[in-house]
Amino acid sequence: MTAATKRAVNDLEVVEGIFQRIAADLAMIIDRPFAVSETRVERANARAVGKGQVHISFKLCFKLGERTAHGCVLIPLPDAVSLAAYLMMVPDDAVKSHRTTTTLDPSTKDAMLEVGNFIGGAADAVVRSWFTDEYSIRAEGCQGVRANVRPALIYQEGDELLVGRAKGRIHEYPEFEILLMLPALDGMRAP
């Protein structure tokens, strides 16, 4: 196996592990199924965009020693709202109406931040298992991102990113694309 092939296999395993851990942790908290499938990954030199609709960017900060890098998980707004509503124990029928909202009330915003904390914790657990506690990851809030616009990150244009894409499905709602952008972890070395 060549070094490039080995790196691609590890990239996929790390990204798939993060997606699966996010889904498992959130499914447990919302008490509804959250499935992730068809994971794929690529190395890219630009931030990916969430296509066709508004997305919520759950921001992540990666730390290695004194060095930091940033990434995010992008989830379409209706599905992010569903996660927040279920976290607030909103009944299924009311979640359906919440999914159509374009303005978030303060309690939904707070629940969305808590969803981000679970996403950060899931990413931290998986990355630490692969990189033996070299890295720590924490959530750094969330924000809405217009359709077909790159999410705002502390990021140097042209730096290498891992971009993961997968199909997600929460409870009985339609499938959606979930995106994950990570700094190229093997390239992030301590100063």
Image (cartoon, rainbow, N blue to C red):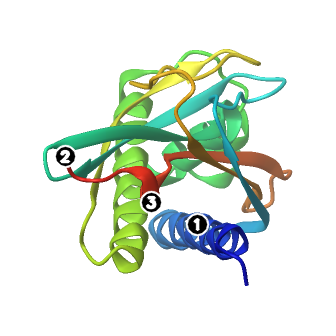
Q: Tell me what residue is drawn at x 56 percent, y 40 percent.
A: 160
Whole-percent x, y for residue 190 in the image: 22, 52
Locate residue 13, reporting x and y percent: 62, 75
Query: Residue 101, percent across and down?
Result: 66, 22
Other-residue count near label 1 (Cα within 10 Å), few / some / many at <14 / 14–19 / ≥20: many
Q: What is the CA distance from the residue labelled 3 to the residue labelled 1?
A: 25 Å
Label 2 to label 1: alpha-carbon separation:
34 Å
Identity, as a three-letter code, of the amino acid under mark 1: Ala
Query: Which element is circle 3 on?
Result: helix
**Considering depth in this image, is 153 or 2 the residue closer to the camera?**
2
Q: Is residue 105 above or below residue 173?
A: above
Camera-side residue: 139 or 113?
Answer: 139
**Residue that carries the numbered disc 2 in the rendered image:** 191
Label annotation for residue 186: 3
Front label number (2 vs 1): 2
Inspect the image, locate mark 2, and give the three-letter code of the amino acid beneath it.
Pro
| Comes first in the chain, label 2 or label 3 | 3
Q: Secondary structure at mark 2?
A: loop
